[in-house]
Image: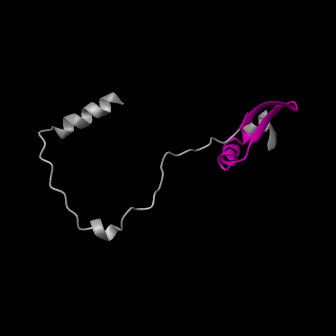
Amino acid sequence: MKRIGVAELKNNLSRNLRLVEGGEVIEITDHDRAIARIVPIETKTRLVIREPTRPFSEIASKRYPRLDADVDYVQLLLEDRRRR
């Protein structure tokens, strides 16, 4: 854990934030008294990569018929964006 004063943190903020992004924990001190700690955010992803259940060669030539739906795609996209 790296300990730095408030003045040093302000003077080198970008460099210190890159250290935190790289996994370093920084403790901020004011007159040698610890007042805060900057810790990296744990990045958890919901993405799970699984092995394929069958080889790609089995499905490479598969074609699906075009969907003929009576939908205004522009309107559908606009509705979706309004909800966000």
Quadrant placement of the C terminus:
top left
Is 70 in the magenta?
no
Report x, y in % for residue 43. 58, 44
The residue positioned farthest toward the right in the image shown = 32
The quadrant in which residue 72 appears is top left
Tell me the residue at 74%/35% (across/down).
37
Tell me the residue at 82%/33% (across/down).
29
Please state the extent of the stretch shown in magenta in the rendering. Answer: 10-38
In this rendering, the answer to whether 25 lies above or below 60 is above
Q: Nearer the viewer, residue 67 or 39?
A: 67
Count of numbered tags: 0
Report x, y in % for residue 22. 67, 50
In this rendering, the answer to whether 41 lies above or below 36 is below
In this rendering, the answer to whether 81 lies above or below 44 is above
The residue positioned farthest toward the bottom in the image shown = 57
Tell me the residue at 48%/51% (across/down).
48
The quadrant in which residue 2 appears is top right
